[in-house]
Image (cartoon, rainbow, N blue to C red):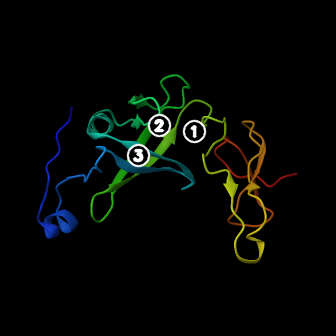
Amino acid sequence: MTAFPVLSDKHALEDGTQLAPRFDTNGLITCVTTDAETGELLMVAHMNADALGRSIETGEAWYWSRSRQQLWHKGDTSGQVQTIVEMRIDCDQDALWLKVNVAGDGGCCHTGRCSCFYRAKPLRAGAEAPLIRLCAGARGSVCWSPPKPGHFSRCCMGRDELAG
């Protein structure tokens, strides 16, 4: 297992240049993963020290599967390998952000969608409404892209298109 330093000095932790991830009581750190080209949120997962070390060493995303209790090299079985373009750590070093390029069919979610975040919760006056499905599900299906009303994209195609 990869060992990372523990910094007790708040200034060193927040302003220093040494990576000293603050893993939770289960030995995990939260990892937000986005598409390096589009900025789209793909998934949120967790890493233990070994997964983080392997991600740094290989330049590919490794996670810790909480359900299977094992290391998970994203794309090993699906072909959706995530090549890390940039890795960031937040101010108090308890969360990671990966910007990745996704191989294979460009998918990310185990449901077959490009992103694990394919439903939106209506707020305020619409709060009683059910979740809004932004993506029907099948790879290549038309999905609504929230930033611009009426703007659509093809799931897992890597570019936005107007629905026609």
Disc 1: which residue:
108
Cα separation, mark 3 vs mark 1, equals 16 Å
Give the residue number, with chain letter if any, for mark 3: 85
x, y (%) of residue 142? 79, 46
Q: Tell which of 88 and 29 is nearer to you.
A: 29
Which sits in the foreground, 163 or 47? 47
Q: Nearer the observer, disc 2 or disc 3?
A: 2
* Residue 10 image offset from top left, x and y in percent: 16, 68
Which type of secondary structure does the marked residue at label 3 adopt?
A: strand
CB contact under 8 Å: marks 2 and 1: yes
Q: Is residue 158 left or right of residue 163?
A: left
Q: Amino acid at mark 2?
A: Gln
Circle 3 crowding by C-alpha within 10 Å: few under 14, some 14–19, many from 20: some
Q: Quadrant of the N terminus?
A: top left
- Say which amino acid is labelled 1: Cys
Side of 68 relative to 17 (left or right): right
Q: Report which residue position mark 2 lands on.
A: 82
Residue under the image location 45 percent in, 29 percent down? 68
Q: Position of residue 164 (x, y in %)?
A: 88, 51
Above or below, comparing residue 45 to residue 93 in the picture: above
Give the mark, 2 or 1, whose residue is nearer the N terminus: 2
Say the numbered circle drawn on residue 22.
none
Q: Element type at marker 2?
A: strand
